[in-house]
Image (cartoon, grey):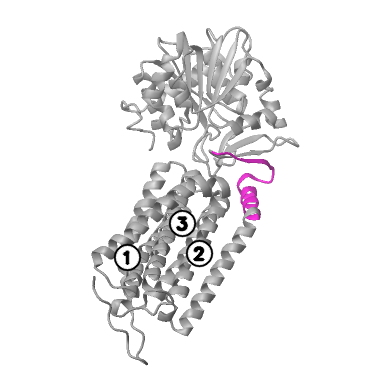
Amino acid sequence: MIEPHAPAPPGAPPPWGVQGQARLPVRPGIGRFLVLAGVFVCAACGLVYELELVAIASYLIGDSVTQASVVLSVMVFAMGVGSLAAKRLSPRAAAGFGAVEAVLALVGGCSAMALYAVFAWTGGWGGPWAEGPRCLLVVFSLTIGLLIGAEVPLLMELIQRIRRQDPGGAVADLFAADYVGALFGGLAFPFLLLPLLGQLTGALLTGTVNVIAGGALVLGLFRGDLTRRARWTLVVTNVVVLGLLASAAVLVGDFERAARHALYGADARAVLRTGAQEAVLTGGTHGRPLRLFLDGRLRFSGRDERRYHEALVHPAMSGPHARVLVLGGGDGLAAREVLRHPGVRRVDIVEPDADVVRLARHDAALSALNRHVYDDPRVHVVTADVFGRLRGARTTYDVVVSDLPDPRVTAATKLYSQEFYGLARRVLAPGGRLVVHAGPLADRRRAFWTVDATIRAAGLSTRPYRVVGRDPGPAARPGGRGAGGRGRAGAAGSAGDWGFVLASRTPVPLRLDASRPRPRTLTQAALTADALAASRVRFPRPLPPSTLVHPRYTD
């Protein structure tokens, strides 16, 4: 252990950095413990900021692997730059650390609100990375990374000012507190902050804790290292930051309502935050079409949902259909079309989100649209992970309807894998059919034909087809915000469509049941023509299947 330097003579200017021992209001051992406690709190807050950016980017933009990679790589790079830049602040480590924490608390605490505001009011996340709202995500990642990176060198200076010791031992103590704090922040975000407070309030609370911890450490422990002017400047700065964060927390409810109004229009009438997503119902009254949005992506529109669901269900129902399994489809609309066919004895629905089922049961407009299918004794709903439920299935079905999110949404990629279709093949009865919503064909040709190739790799014969959509909804119009989903009819401004793949163990004809019921929006001639049109835009080269360890749906 290196002995501390002798204190400066009376009247001499205070020593800075590690050249002298700090004048502490407590014993050095307690002071050292308080610095390490500050490291713990700051590390926890820093990791929450990182996870917050990853989460909100994944919810609003989609493709969580890409967003996580961009955010984390930019932040780690910025942390290195911030560590180098912090060397200039070493002579004034206490004042520098206080300033860094105040700015970090303000930027990190308000980051989620700023990103959500841009998402709601600027027309979405389209455009290359160098332009548009996506650039703001990179700016926040870079700024927060710079500030987090500046913390460790400054804290190293402060802990050495208390009691100089071997640099290796100081680094070990500092990083131990830092890593334990990061563990706490990483667990607190998904298990406490996100479910109890939500993204916006959770980020604001984290910023509040951050500025209080930083200000208390500097003003309480190292106030002797600050001039009178520096102390008052830091006090005023922290009070202003706390005031801004508190004001934002008070107004967060009004902000969310205004942003939702900008995002969904004036007729948003039901908002449900589930454990997995945010569900918003709009319209359904005064002649306005009913629409369901999940995490900002249009799930269905009442203007043309019938065309989608008839195209999804009716071709697969041509043949035996006593037992039907619907994967997803918690809104009950696919089951509604299934129940129109005579001879259906049982419909099993596997929906991951129980709140979507609850909404479909009890919302007057939605339950009327699905014709109260959940009151039918033949319908049995299970809330479970679709992949896990299919893996454990012991029953066979004549028809399996896969009514799941777009394959390019990372969370749903495993539900479009070769392994998943292998499980679906296992539950098909002899002569059974599987139908899959494969996303739009017009502007996502590669993803569509990858679905087809993946189903064939699982040992099934396929018949791809498509139907033209009509109402893409606000999430897919020019300037829209959707990242996919069955409601998105295509690229903004393009003629949209829905793509499907019908599959069976043996070659299956693409036809409608000649007996009743007749679809209202679909004819055999149109279905045959659309299937022919789909075959004409086949991908120019063979595509490999998508698997759990090698997903292939990102363009």
In the depicted structure, whether residue 555 falls above or below residue 317:
below
Closer mark to the observer between disc 3 and disc 1: 1
Q: Quadrant of the N terminus?
A: bottom left
Image disc number at residue 83: 1
The residue carrying mark 2 is 106
**Residue at coordinates 51% horizontally, 30% vertically from top-left?**
497
Q: What is the three-letter code of the residue carrying label 3? A: Leu
Residue in the foreground of this view, choosing between 433 and 103: 103
In the depicted structure, whether residue 320 falls above or below residue 410:
above
- Asked whether, in this view, residue 96 is left or right of residue 512, the answer is left
Query: Is residue 303 at least partly visible in the picture?
Result: no
Q: Position of residue 295 (x, y in %)?
A: 55, 41
Give the structural element (helix, strand or loop) at label 1: helix
Give the structural element (helix, strand or loop) at label 3: helix
Query: Is residue 435 at least partly visible in the picture?
Result: yes
Q: What is the three-letter code of the residue carrying label 1? A: Ser
The residue carrying mark 3 is 136
What is the span of residues highlighted in magenta in the rendered image?
Answer: 254-275
- For this orientation, the residue located farthest to the bottom is 11
Q: Quadrant of the C terminus?
A: top left
